[in-house]
Amino acid sequence: MAAGLLAGAGLVILGTVFVILPSVVVDHDLAGASVAAQERLKAVNDVRTTLVQVVGGLVVLFGAYATWRQLRVSQDGLRATQEGYVTDRFSRAVDQLGSDKLDVRIGGLHALWRIAEQSARDREAIISIQAAYLRTHLPWPPAGPESPAADVPINDIAPLETRAADAQVALTALGVLCRHREQPWVNLSITDLRRADCDGLWFPEVNFDRACMEAAGLYHANLTQASLVSVNLRHADLTTAILRRARCILADLRAAKLVETDLRDADFTETDLREANLRKADANGAVFHRADLRMADLRGTDLSTANLVEAHLTGALASEHTRWPAGFDHTAAGVVDTDDPGPEPSPLLQPPGITRQAPPLRSTP
């Protein structure tokens, strides 16, 4: 009944617009002037044609608007469906992290990694989950019968990817996702990352305070502005890594490999760098206040603007390519001048840092 009434009303309106209105418009324009019937009929038809064009244009505009609205509704529905799907995947992946089966946990970590790459809004939450996973599963000092004790020699400890494959997956994912994160800090402090594989990963502004990263592979890793306070990096491979503006206060870097590493403006106050290899490192602006650099290899190292106040340098090696701060007497500090080793060997020809044997330290504990 209502539809019939609407149809009738529509016909009445159309009849008024196309039958009556053109004559009214023509008569109004003529203002009573006398014209031939044929000319009047032509004027009425011209008005009708114009009205048809106007109505047609309105119909097209209405159709376009209706299509746009339908598209918006469809997009909103699709977005809601996708978000529901992502939420479901997220929940199932988090549930997998609590499994007692290693392969299930690894699957959950990979699922979260995939979600973070596809959903920017979930990336920060997933980064936090991965960091929490590492802190709870790899605390330092070690807890649990499956974790190597803190006093086990580093050469007797298997690489992280072997002894805790799930933790290595979480660490790798974290080092990839941190390249595009928004939150300023990620907390990996007080974690057991001995012999971890971090080659090429990004950890800018990550907190590694009091973590144990002994013999970790950090080749070409990005640790810009990272906090490494009291961290254990003995025998770690930091070749060509970036530690610019990093805080390495009170850290242990004995026998660490820092060849061609970017150390600009980093703070190594009271850090133990005995036997460390800093060949060709860029240490401009770095602070070595009261740092222990005895027996360190400084051949080709750029220390021209470094702070070496109260640094211990007895037995450190230098060459003609080592650059010292203006007025600094390295000979009086106990530095030994020797030949430059020449170009560094290609890292591709060297064994992975996480599997190489760590030689005994000559320095006392």
Image (cartoon, rainbow, N blue to C red):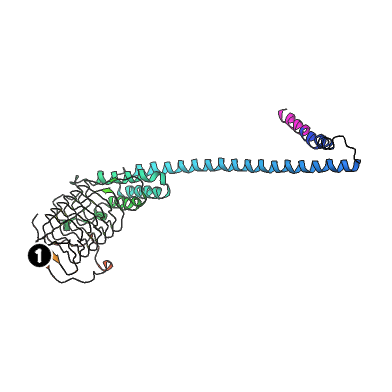
- Residue 237 location in percent, x, y? 22, 60
Quarter in which the N terminus is drawn: top right
Question: Mark 1: few, some, or many residues within 10 Å (few <14, many ≥20)?
Answer: few
Left or right: 54, with 123 as reference point: right
**Residue at (20, 66) in percent of width and height:** 300
- Residue 276 location in percent, x, y? 16, 60
Quarter in which the C terminus is drawn: bottom left
- Residue farthest to the right, as pictured: 36
The overriding secondary structure of the stretch rendered in magenta is helix
Instruction: Report the magenta residues as a range.
Output: 1-12
Determine if the magenta segment contains residue 298: no
Closest to the observer, 29 or 119: 29
- Residue farthest to the top, as pictured: 1
Count of residue discs? 1
**Residue at (70, 41) in percent of width and height:** 59
Left or right: 90, with 324 as reference point: right
Closest to the observer, 223 or 283: 283
Dot 1 amino acid type: Thr
User: Mark 1 highlights which residue?
Assistant: 331
Is disc 1 placed on a helix, strand or loop?
loop
- Residue 257 location in percent, x, y? 20, 61
Closest to the observer, 106 or 140: 140
Residue 318: which quarter of the image?
A: bottom left
- Residue 144 location in percent, x, y? 19, 45
Q: Is residue 137 above or below residue 217?
A: above
Determine if the magenta segment contains residue 4: yes
